[in-house]
Image: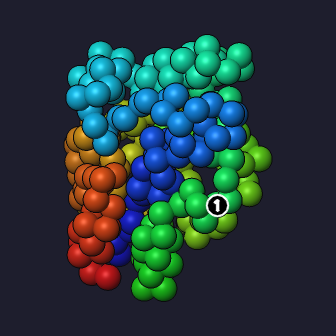
Amino acid sequence: MTALVLDFGGPVLRTPFELLRGGETRVGLPAGSLPWTGPFDPEADADWRAMQAHEISERDYWQRKADEFATLTGREASFRGLMDVLFAAPEDELLRPEARRLAEDARAAGVPVAVCTNDMQAFHGLEWVQSNQFLKLVDVLVDGSVEDILKPDPRIYLMVVERLGIAAEDCVFVDDQPGNIAGAEAVGMQSVWFDVTEPASSYAEARALLGL
């Protein structure tokens, strides 16, 4: 049996970069006050390039952005506070429709669905996680911020495999961070690097691997 294993932020949940303008509006900042571009324009975002070069962690990256946000707004300098503002929208506006369709089609075909994420609860809080409707489609949820193990540590992938009850080789893993893809491949998972600038093509590749 093949299983679908999804990273959450990026493949399922739209990236914070796609939500910046709405966040600015919510706190009364002029459009463009949050100029972070991440994967959409790496040359314009030095911190993103540093993260991709493994000079800083993803949490370091978002802490720097939270510090900038706090300076502009006078709010607490925490990435949780920043995420609360950016993701304060109805779920349908936050989730990629391709992700929901794939999860529904996978379950209809008898393919189990897992989410393997690093910082869901750390970024969004337990109440947000418990109310998320997409997660009701998921058979297994492994959150590194709960387990205290973060991708690309091989233990987190093996935890997913164990809870699914299948071999790593039978998992199709989808993630937008190359380092996390490398970690999945190191334990034997099939993988799809999710290009956040081309969601449809990335999901088409995952569907092909799953035979959907």
Amino acid of disc 1: Glu
Nearest the eye: 26 or 135? 26
Residue at left offset 29%, top offset 28%: 44
Q: Where residue 25 appears, x then y in whole percent?
A: 64, 41
Q: Is residue 184 left or right of residue 71?
A: left
Q: Is residue 36 left or right of residue 130?
A: left
Q: Is residue 144 left or right of residue 102?
A: right
Image position of 173 with respect to 37: above or below: below
Quadrant in the rendering for residue 172: bottom left
Quadrant in the rendering for residue 191: bottom left
Image position of 115 with respect to 81: above or below: below
Residue at left offset 61%, top offset 14%: 71
Image position of 88 with respect to 98: above or below: above
Q: How many marks?
A: 1
Residue 110 in view of the camera: no
Q: Quadrant of the N terminus?
A: bottom left
Q: Secondary structure at mark 1?
A: helix
Q: Residue furthest front?
A: 30
Q: Residue furthest right?
A: 127
**Residue at the spot of label 1:** 91
Q: Where residue 36 appears, x then y in whole percent?
A: 42, 30
Q: Where residue 60 appears, x then y in whole percent?
A: 46, 19
Q: Is residue 40 left or right of residue 106?
A: left
Image position of 145 with respect to 128: above or below: above
**Callout 1 crowding tier (Cα within 10 Å): few <14, some 14–19, many ≥20:** some
Q: Where residue 19 appears, x then y in whole percent?
A: 53, 46
Residue 150 in view of the camera: yes
Nearest the eye: 183 or 35? 35
Q: Quadrant of the C terminus?
A: bottom left
Nearest the eye: 141 or 53? 53
Nearest the eye: 54 or 156? 54
